[in-house]
Amino acid sequence: MPGMPTDGGGAIVPFRGEPGLGLPPPTVRPIHHGVAPPMFRIYVSWSSGNLLQVACLRAPNSEGAGGAEEVAGSVVEVNLGGGGSGGSESEEKIDEAEMRRIEYGSVPAFALLQSRKNALADAAALSRASVPDHAEWWQYVLEYSKTIGSLLGNADCPAAFMLEDPKAILKVREKPTSLRAAWELLEIFYVDKQLQGWLPERLVDWLADFDSLLSSMGSTTYSKLSNFQKKFINLQIIEDDPDYWNGLSAALSVGWLDTVVNMLRFHGSYQLDQMDNRETENGLVEAVVVLVSTMPRMRPNLPTGKLGQCCKTRPDFIKAWEKWRGQVTKLECSAFWIQCGHQKTRDGLKNLLRIMMGNIKDLTAATSNWLELFASHFLYIKPFTVGFEGMHHLAQKCIQLKPPSGTNGLTGLFIGVLSENPEVVLAECTNNFGPWLVTHAMELLTADNDYADIMLHEERPNLGGISLEELHRLVYAQVLCSHSLTWQIAPTYLSSCLNQGLGLLEILLLKQPIQDNRLVLKTLEICRLYELDNVSTNIMKVAGIYHWKHGRKGSGVYWFQQAHDKVHLDRIAQLLFERIGKSVTDDSFKQWEGLLELLGPDIGSAGGLEFLHRYRDFKRSLQQALDGRSGEAARKTVDFLMQLMRNPSTPQRFWLPLLHDSVELFNFKPNPLMDVAETTLLLKKLRELSMAKLRPDFSSNHLPSHALSSVKLALASNLAYAILEDP
Amino acid sequence: MADTPSFRRHRLASSIDFVRWLPSSATSHSGRLLAAAVHDPSSAPATSRIHLLALTEPGNPLVSLSLPTRATALRCSPSVIAASTSSGSLHLLPSSFDSDAAVAISGGAGFHVGPVRGLDCGGEEWVTAGEDGRVHVVGGGADGRVVATRVWDGKGMSGYEAARWASPAEFATGGAGCGVQWWDRRKGHAVVAQCNGIWGRGIVTGMVHSVDIHPSRKHICVVGGSSGTIFAWDLRWPQQPIALSGIGLNGMYEPVCESEVWEVLFDTYTQSSDIVSSASTRILPVMMCSEDGVLAIVEQDERPLELLAEACAINSIDIDPQNPSDVVCALEWESIGVLARGRETMSEE
């Protein structure tokens, strides 16, 4: 794309932002090209990845060069990187290398799922009557989801093997990422059918894992507790501190029972020297501890270290729940509270009891944001909330009670999921988590959701006839292509795009650098996998030309041969002839040996180079014949000569040199080596050559002027002998 | 994808082109050591380095030597780590691992122009064979400097991709389309034998990527190259190469792979399945790695034994000379794989 620079200010292209749109000003990148102005031409083109190649040229004969060596032009590469992959996670940005690890790891899972999808579709097409096995399909998607989830980190295992601090309130764990939180959320709602009945508890678990990520919305239970943790070490009387009780109620409201129990045990009344005077107080604290740790929970199992009693079925749960609530009420009405001397303990514990009773006012006060309030509803008010509609309604109520103070990608995603709106889910994923998540999460969305399936797979004229699914895959593939380490995995995604994928794949492969043989072979391997034979032929031709131009003639010929490129091989043959024509009597011919060796015995594939092969054989044989003076070797040499002279591919300009080289053979004593017919043929060729000499395009060779006459003489004498010999 | 007790992956967050065991005579506090040639195109400008890594903690390089361009070969001798680059230079890092003591021969008209993929250590001397068709022997001069002696200048007419010493006087090279050559320095630094090899799929020529010579059978080369081809070349019958794997070669089992065979090594750990008749005529087991992610043992007239089938290419392998059961490989997806072969992997066969 050539552009003419303007004179003023060195600006090349004036930028005209639409005034109404309020676009940000363009980023200006100074380029150090070292070419003195005035500039004549500037070419800009994309190189691989984020690199932009800018070629700056001066006018070919601009005056003022002053004789000194001035740069006539230069090519500089500008790296436009640093934009990231579109993710906007501010608090825990995944670095590029880590993101690449996730990208690599998700390729096999994605490819496996696609091949299973195709296999199921094929099976369904064969037996039209039976619909594809749905149960089987979501199992596959779940397996895929678990594989990808494991790449994003494991929130359950501790970050490292370390001795646990006895005074630690919060367990040290691997830092969670928004990417993982979003993935798990989608898995919970869209894929994991087995655990659908225990959905509320799963959301509580999810919040426990990822609460720390919600800090952009204001304070969270996690931030309250971690702030208290810092303060905790310096506290003398822990139960006098309001933050202690605030932390306790916050942790209880979101169901972190182990944390609550752990914190309650730090209460001053447990200290041995105070046991006696604070017996009742301690009894009350311990009673709350027991109630907290026996809270019934509607879930199949509890991970080790978590507290509560597990109830798998609804009737079991209702029974346990009634009993437990009864115990909580009983404790609240107990007479021991009057005997409790410590005011703050009394208020704090009573507050905890009210939370356990499901008092909406206290829950609202204890929780920090609407998501926490939402989770506390499941724990203490409506443990049987099921269905998207009910949940969405509840979420709306929680948002009203605790209006969000900031935005967070996760809450947006949450609302999108609850409102059963796949468009919103997709938009939130695109805006907040980048193309990797969108591409891989689409499989989760469509696992068991017909509406999302239709929405993603419908071909849209406004997108050029491609579906939303294809669009997002193409976007992700472009991101992969823009990095030289990840471009190799882009074909997996491009090949799953039926409309435009293959075309883009061809472009991608053709744009790969061809300087390095190993990289070329890697590109060709991808061509082989996707059966893109004409692309690989093109790449081989380009590589051939590159190597030939850079003096690696052998490599050049190798690639042309692999590409079956007769045109270029013939042209190379012409070039070689010119070189050899000059050094025909020289023994520097040895240099060409390697190249001829390369051509191999299959001269058919070598095009015009076939001649060189025969010529080499002839020269070698001639050498032996002249050295050894044996009749047999000489006869063989003549055979080679005759083959060469008869072969139409032997260039005319080599006729005379060949004959001149063979003069000694023609004079071979005692018997002539050639019979009458052979000699006649050679004489005919000689005459043809004399005729050709008159044509303007005849190329003269560097033989002595008497060459022609000496050949003629030798042939004539040979003919004479041959006639005599002829029986 | 998951790691197993016998196979572990370690991420390095940059492209790893080659990985080698360091001979353990070069001892250190950190236990067994690896050398890796890494390339990071995402930094601006792109960087290439040799890393010295401890097997216990490959994430943190102990020593790092910067290279001018991407490494095209890496070899270790007991005293030196050597790497050649795509710009034709050779870099020698002594086993004191002091990167200031590293010696380099820069690329250019006096040495190699373009990538040098053939590199091997034979006692005191190194052989380099480049795509420019030049072959050098590099050794220590009288005054302690390294001196490169040109053995041959092919002037680009043929390009070499691999080199291996057989004895202090003989070495083998291989390249694009030219098969394998046997060089003898006692005979005027010249090619004394030549073999085009056997290539599958009806083609007559392919690219050689790797040559290995067994230390106790110096007349036999094993060669790995394009289109999944692995063949052995016995100097005693130079015109009859023996096919070990390849597409469409008769009398063979299913080829172990159809893509580029990046590296072949004689596997001293795997016992030949036919011990009684393992006379000198039989080719010993060979380990190979390929672009389609296969790490396998191939043997003459035997079904190949697949050790790994990765989702990405395996660019380089090395067998620990001291503990031949341990194999290290460079994976395309920015990681190093360490395979510990025990009894259980062998009993599967």
Image (spheres, grey):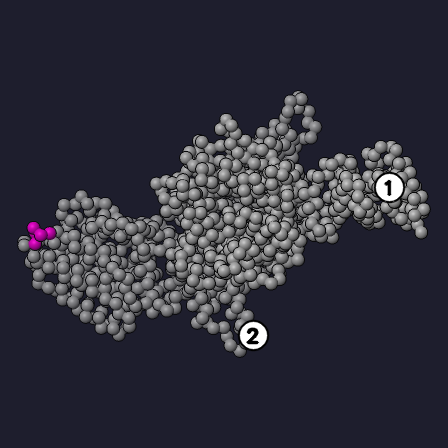
The spot of residue A435 in percent (x, y) is: 48, 53
Label 1: chain? A
Q: Is residue B208 visible?
A: yes
Disc 2 crowd rating (10 Å Cα; few below 14, some 14-19, many 20+) is few
User: What residue is disc 1 on?
Assistant: A669
SS at badge 2: helix
A104 left or right of A612 in image: left
* Residue B239, image x, y percentages: 65, 52
Q: State the separation of the CA atoms marked 2 and 1.
A: 83 Å
* Residue A126 - label: 2
* Image x and y of residue A578, in percent: 77, 39
Closer to the chain start, of discs 2 and 1, is 2
Residue most extreme to the left = A277
Q: Hey, which quadrant is residue A250 in on the image?
A: bottom left
**Chain letter, disc 2 residue:** A
CB under 8 Å between discs 2 and 1 = no
Say which element carries label 1: loop
Q: Give the range drawn in magenta.
A: A271-275
Q: Given the image, on which type of amino acid does mark 1 rest? A: Lys
Residue at left offset 66%, top offset 55%: B203
Q: Are marks 2 and 1 on the same chain?
A: yes
Please name whichever residue, A602 or A12, is drawn nearer the observer in this view of the structure. A602
**In front of the other: label 2 or label 1?**
1
In the image, what residue type sits under mark 2?
Leu
Answer whether residue B50 is visible to the viewer in this image: no
